[in-house]
Image (cartoon, rainbow, N blue to C red):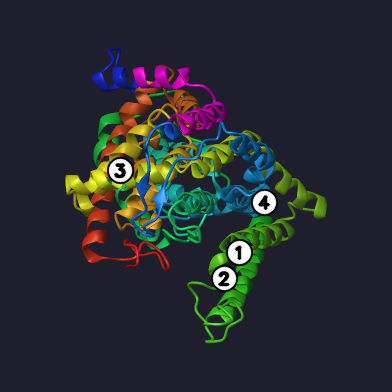
Amino acid sequence: MTNVKTKKSGIDKFLSVVERIGNALPHPATLFAGFALLVIILSWVASQFDLAVTHPGTGETVTPVNLLSTEGLHMILTRMVTNFTGFAPLGTVLVSLLGIGIAEGTGLIGAVLRLVVLSSPKRLLTFVIVFAGVISNTASEVGYVLLVPLAAVIFLAAGRHPLAGLAAAFAGVSGGYSANLLLGTVDPLLAGLSTEAAKIIDPGYIVNPAANYYFMFVSTFLIAALGTWVTEKVVIPRLGEYEGDEKPQSIDRLNSQEKRGLLYATIAILLMVAFILGGLLPDNGYLRDPETNEILHSPFMSGIVAFIFLLAGVAGIAYGIGAKTIKNDSDVMRGMAKSMETLGSYIVLVFFAAQFVAYFNWTNLGLILAINGADVLQTMGLSDIPLMIMFIIVAALINLVMGSASAKWAIMAPVFIPMFMLLGYTPEFTQVAYRIGDSVTNIISPMMSYFALIVAFIQRYDKKAGIGTVISTMLPYTVAFFIGWVILLVIWILAGLPVGPGAEMYMAQ
């Protein structure tokens, strides 16, 4: 970049303060351990006062449960293991990543990204890169480590500023985190947390991993279009001509083995799709509900995580056989094991998050807070649109100081989902609003786990670049994504559309 600022702007100064505050926070797992302890203390405090409320659904009186009592101590000790093993997001994330680990380990995901980007017409290059960034979210972090640096190389090879390509890819991967044409690891993760929170009001409520799919599908094209517009109209003119030392590199096209691998993977996916359609299209299909023949409440919908695992795993194995990147079953298992190696910190975090969520439910504090909060919001008289915009802004601001989507939602869901359920909004709709706020500020949040990596990528092309460079480059995407997504949500609300299969915006009366 030729016009690096030597004087920090107000935004840079503000985000430097945010960074310092965020860095001063303890590890998220430690935070949840502290929250769990705080809930125990608050349960005792609440039990000393008359904080009883009336459940609006059942008419029963809800009182706080003291976890510092003998009974509470027994619950904490005897249910610690089951709190962890029964925590909804844990199994779904582990199973999803096992399949995606095969697809990533055999090279399928990398080959697909290269093929998509390299085969696109030059005039559609920016759109394809942003679009590929959004799609890469299916495989979690692969977009950060593969597509973002690759996009810079591609732009440089095309005679354009490499940082523009890097920014476009980063915007798609991170800013478009809640848009996709496919279900990925984040969908079952958030759905599991939402299910746990919804059970505070309705113990039988289940949020399906595909609950936001309709909104995500449409959002994919919105984010790709907005990302393209910002790149072409704002970022590229600001960057000007590239005058750095890096020279264009040739990007290897797919060799014959990789092409054969993609052919094998395509055949495998088509066979899997045929199997799925064969079980869904007939009225008495084997993947429909055996009693009602419905699809929405069928083994297929409740087994979405299993299908993510099977599709990714079968396609990955087929690619590996065709491309000869796997020689035996050990190579397949190695790819699955590698995906599990990245989850060490997550599993530690989940242990403490599971205890916090369980304690929060046992004490009835979440239900009491939800009922009182719903009463306050009702007295404010906010309609659907301003209420959800306020919630999106809250999620976006929290994202600046707490990068993990699951960690934030584990804290926010037990409060906001029951509260909004009492106001008549479904957990699936609340989750959509959260995902918008969580995504739009990812690209300007120093707390985002891959932010430092993005800075390192940028410094390859601009030695003087730093956090301020990233923020100033990506801020236009945040503004555009926020405005565009809010407008889309408003249209969705006015049209009364479901956000996913069987996921309406409002609770059934």
Q: Which residue is mark 3?
A: 373
Displayed quadrant of residue 71: top right
Q: Of the two numbered discs 4 and 1 on the same chain, state the one appearing first in sequence.
A: 4
Mark 3 and mark 1: span between their CA atoms? 38 Å
**Looking at numbered disc 1 in the image, what kind of residue is underneath it?**
Phe
Q: Quadrant of residue 502?
A: bottom left
Instruction: Tell me the distance, in whole angstroms, between the alpha carbons under discs 2 and 3.
Output: 36 Å
Q: Nearer the viewer, mark 4 or mark 3?
A: 3
- Local crowd size for mark 4, using a 10 Å CA cut-off: few (<14), some (14–19), many (≥20): many
Instruction: Name the residue carrying label 1.
Output: 307
Q: What is the quadrant of the N terminus in the image? A: top left
Q: Which residue is mark 4?
A: 98
Is residue 127 depicted above or below 264 in this figure? Answer: above
Whether residue 119 sits left or right of residue 130 in the image: it is right
Q: Position of residue 258 (x, y in %)?
A: 65, 55
Looking at the image, tell me whether mark 2 or mark 3 is earlier in sequence order. Answer: 2
Quick one: label 2, few (<14), some, or many (20+) residues within 10 Å? some
Q: Amino acid at mark 4?
A: Leu
- The local crowd at label 3, few if under 14, some if 14 to 19, many if 20 or more residues have their Cα within 10 Å, is some
The reply to whether residue 240 is in sight is: no
Q: Is residue 461 left or right of residue 393?
A: right
Give the residues in magenta: 16-45
Q: Earlier in the sequence, mark 3 or mark 1?
A: 1
